[in-house]
Amino acid sequence: MNSSAIAASGLRKAYHDKVVLDGIDLDVAAGTIFSLLGPNGAGKTTTVNVLTTLIKADGGTARVAGHDVATETRAVRAAIGVTGQFAAVDELLTGRENLQLMADLQRLGPDRSKRIVTDLLERFDLTDSAQKMAATYSGGMRRKLDLAMTLVGTPRIIFLDEPTTGLDPRSRRTMWDIIRQLVAEGVTIFLTTQYLDEADRLADRIAVLDQGKLVAQGTPAELKRQIPGSHVRLRFAGDLEFDSAMRILTDSTRDEEDLVLRVPSDGGAKSVRALLDTLDDHSIEVEEFSVHMPDLDDVFLALTGRTSTKVNAS
Amino acid sequence: MNNSTTMLRRNFKHTIRNPVAVFNAVLFPIVILLMFVYVIGGAFDIGGHYIDYATPGMIVLTICYGLSATALAVNSDMTKGIINRFKVMDISRSAVLSAHVAAGMLRSLIAVAAILGVAFALGFRPAASSPQWLGAIGLIVLVALATSWITVALGLAAKTPESAGMAAVPLIMLPFLSSAIVPAATMGPGVRQFAEYQPFTPIIETLRGLLTGAPSAGSAIVAVAWCVGIALVGYLWSLSTFKKRA
C-alpha cells in the first residue's frame, strides 16, 4: 500500500439520463483530512456511496486502503468506517446496546468489546445516557452515538457524510474536536460538507464539487486565494467622509454611487478595531459598518460564475 | 457468535420492546375466531363442529395477520438508514434479512400457540395422530417461513413505512378468500375459482386434513410446492432488492 488512503480516477455515475458524477479524480493521503465541499445535489453522497461500496460506479476506478472498491468489497469494508448523513442508530436499542451490536457484528470478543464500548461511551460523553433507548436521544447525541458506532472496529479510514448538518453550534464544535482527535491518532478522514468554514477549519485538502465535477482542488489557503476574501464594508453619509476615507484606506475597493468602501480584512476583532481606530483618528464618521466573510456562495460564484442557490434551483 | 445470531438477538429485543405489536398479532385473530365461532359461524352448515372446521383456517390467518409487523420492521431499517450501516460492514449479507424472517416467524408461532389454546378452550377437538401433528406443525412453520420471506421482500421494496404496511394487506386478505371460513364450493362463481386456485386453499385443506386425521396427499404436495415457491421468490427478491437499494 502506498501513502494514498483513497485514490479515485474518472468516477462516473448516472441515474437514467441524469449524470451525477462526471469523472471524479481524487487522491487522499493517509492520515489527513480531505473535505469534499459542495451544495446539495452536487454528488457528495454519491461519491461517498461509491467509495464505501454501497453503489457501483458506471465508470472509473477507485481504491480505498489499497483495495479496489468494485472487486475487493469485503477488504474495503473491513478497513473503513462510515457515518452517513442521517444518524444510523437503532432507536429501539440503548446507546450501550447499539455499540455492543457493532462489536458483536465484528466479533471483537466479550472482553475487548466491553472495554471498547465503555471507552467510547466515556469519550463521547454518553455514559449517563448509555442505558436509555436511542429514540430518546437529542440530534447531537444521536450523531455522537452514530460516530461512536463507526469507531467500534477502529477503522483506519473514516467517511463522514455531512457530519454536522443540522447540529447546533455547540454540538458542531464537539464534532470538530472529535474529528481532530481521530486524525491525531493517524486515521484518514474523508469529510463531505456544505460549509466552507468547516472545510477550512478541518481539512488538509479541499475539493469543490459542482454538478458531478470537481471545479477546484487544493489546500484551504490555495483555494481561498481563488475566491474574494473576507472584507469590511463601510458606508459613509456624504462625499466628504467618503473621499477622506478613500485617501487613508488605500487598499480598499470603492463603490462611489453607494458611498461604500470594501476593505480587505480577516474580520477578527483586532484588525477591525485597528481599522475603526484609524478612521477615528482622522475623525471620519462611518454611517454603516459590516463584516463580510466568504461562504459557499462566494466560492461557487468565483469558481463557476453561478451561486450555489441557483444550482439547487436548476 | 456469528452475524445471524447477533442480528437475531437485535430483532428479539425489538419484539420484546414493542409488546403492542405482539399483543395485536395475538389479539386480533382471537377476536376473529370468537366472532366466527359464536356470532357468524352458527349460520354455516359445514357438516360437523364449526370450530373443528374453522381452526386450521384461523391458524393460517393468524400467521398472515402478523406479517404487517414484519413489513414495517424491515422497512423502518431500510428508510432510517441503519441498513446502510450494516451494508458497509464486513458482515454476511443475508444475516440482516434472515433475522427479520426468524423474528417474524417467532411472533407468528407465539400467536398460533395462543389461537390454538383459545380454540381448544372453545371445544376444538382434533383427531390427529402424533405424526399428523408433527406434519401440521411442520406445515405451519413452512407457511410462516414462506410468507415471512415474501413480506421481507415487500418491506424492502416499499418506499415508506405506510406503503410497506399496505403491501402486506393482500397477504392478510388472501386467507379470507380461501376455504378458511367456508368451503370454496359454497362461494359464488369467479370467487370460487379464485379460492380454489390460490395458494392458501390447498395449504388450509392440508392443515385441516392433518388435524382431522384425514390428510390428502394431493393437496399436501400442492401446499408444500406453493410454500417452497413463495419462500424462494421472497428470498431471491429480498436479496436482490437489498443489494440494489443504497
Image: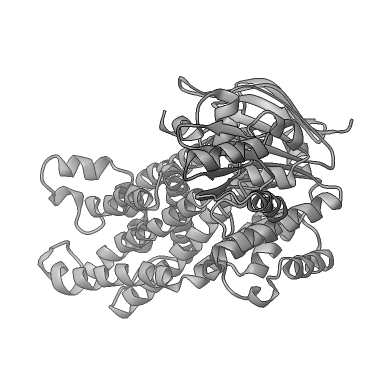
Q: Is residue A258 left or right of residue A222?
A: left
Q: Residue furthest bottom?
A: B121
Q: Quarter of the image holding residue B25?
A: bottom left
Is residue B119 left or right of A79 when viewed as pictured? left
Q: How many marks?
A: 0
Q: Whole-percent x and y of residue A155?
A: 79, 49
Q: How is the image coloured?
A: one colour
Point out residue A306 in the picture as x, y percentages from the top left corner. 50, 26
**Residue nearest the viewer, comparing A188 with B231:** A188
Q: Residue at x 68, y 34 (%)?
A: A251
Q: Nearer the viewer, residue B41 or B232?
A: B232
Residue pictured at 51% horizontal, 72% vertical: B17
Compared with residue A36, is residue B69 higher up or lower down, i.e. above or below? below
User: Which image quadrant: the N terminus of chain B?
Assistant: bottom right
Residue A182 location, x and y as percent?
Answer: 80, 53
- Is any atom of residue B141 visible in this view? yes
Task: Name the residue at the right extreme.
Answer: A2
Does residue A133 appear left or right of residue A250 in this picture? left
**Residue A106: x percent and y percent?**
75, 54
